[in-house]
Amino acid sequence: MGSIAHRSLLEPKSLRVALKMLRDEGPLVPMAGCTDLYVSLNFGTLGAVRFLNLWALDALRPIEMRNGHLSIGALATYTEIIRAPLVRRRLPMLVAAAREIGGPQIQNRGTLGGNVANASPAGDTLPVLAAADATVVLASVNGERRIPVTAFYAGYRKSVMRADELIAAIEVPAIRGRQWFRKVGTRAAQSISKVVMAAVAPGGDSPRIAFGSVAPTVVRVPSTEAALGTGASIAEAQQILLEEIAPIDDVRSTAEYRRRVAANLLARFWNDRHRR
């Protein structure tokens, strides 16, 4: 287990103070629920030594409507997402994803912003956000900027977020059509995804489809979307999908298994899209 003796923690009392600390006292690692940080600490792989505790910043928690978009604060926990009427009504596939992230302890502490910031290709909420055309709201002392989730990741566990920025919220536009989510792991919840998929099937338009655990980052599959939208058979779309993803062998699964599961999930989604 990693030692905490040489580590330091700053505890800002407001978002404004937190952003100033990031600018003036960095580098700092933001932390909140710590569900990922403690894993690294326990394995002795946590290299960072200076942290910024965001847990008390209620300004980062609201789940509300803003300018016609669903806005989910970065510190909204999975439990809060599961219980929020706005999310259940407007983004039920995110509720489905949140239900499969760990057990009640993890759901009570883990946050949406943490899942996004962690940048793992296996993050269960990330395909949902990609398929929903969500936007990441980044805050700094200089103001806010908005980055589409599909442009937020620059590589494996890398993002375009600067060291002086925090994720303030995730914004999701209105979604028309059936929403769909599936996670394949060793067991339901409390396991890391082998393959995770989210999709939206708006009537008459091309679907929006995103996968996790099949590439260095969460990915949309635009060629597969276009093929299905123009009437290709599911078999044809599956072949196109296999050219758009790049899974690997690792301790959880094999590349071949992931390819097969991704193709099967695509077929299941397409067959389910008109079901009630």
Image (tube, rainbow, N blue to C red):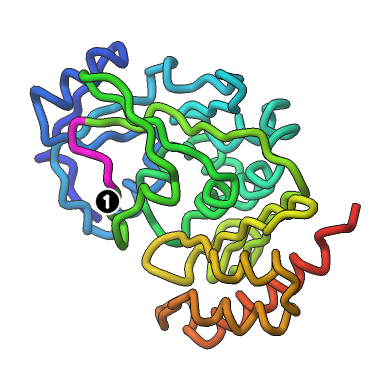
Residue 103 visible in the shown view: no
**In the picture, residue 18 is in which quadrant?**
top left
Q: Nearer the viewer, residue 195 or 155?
A: 155
**At 38% across and 39% down in the image, what residue appears?**
147
**In the picture, residue 241 is in which quadrant?**
bottom right
Q: Nearer the viewer, residue 216 or 209?
A: 209
Q: Position of residue 193 (x, y in %)?
A: 54, 65
Q: Is residue 276 left or right of residue 226?
A: right
**In the picture, residue 143 is in which quadrant?**
top left
* Magenta stretch encompasses residue 19: no
Q: Is residue 18 left or right of residue 134?
A: left
Inspect the image, locate mark 1, and give the three-letter code of the amino acid beneath it: Leu
The residue tagged 1 is: 41
**Quarter of the N terminus within the rendering:** bottom left
**At 34% across and 47% down in the image, what residue appears?**
38
- The vertical placement of 45 against 223, above or below, is above
Q: Can you name the residue that lies furthest to the right here?
A: 276
Q: Position of residue 29 (x, y in %)?
A: 22, 38
* Magenta region, main secondary structure: loop
Q: Position of residue 204 (x, y in %)?
A: 78, 54
- The vertical placement of 75 against 213, above or below, is above
Q: Is residue 13 left or right of residue 79?
A: left
Look at the numbered disc 1 and give the secondary structure of its residue.
helix
Magenta residues? Answer: 160-164
Residue 257 visible in the shown view: yes
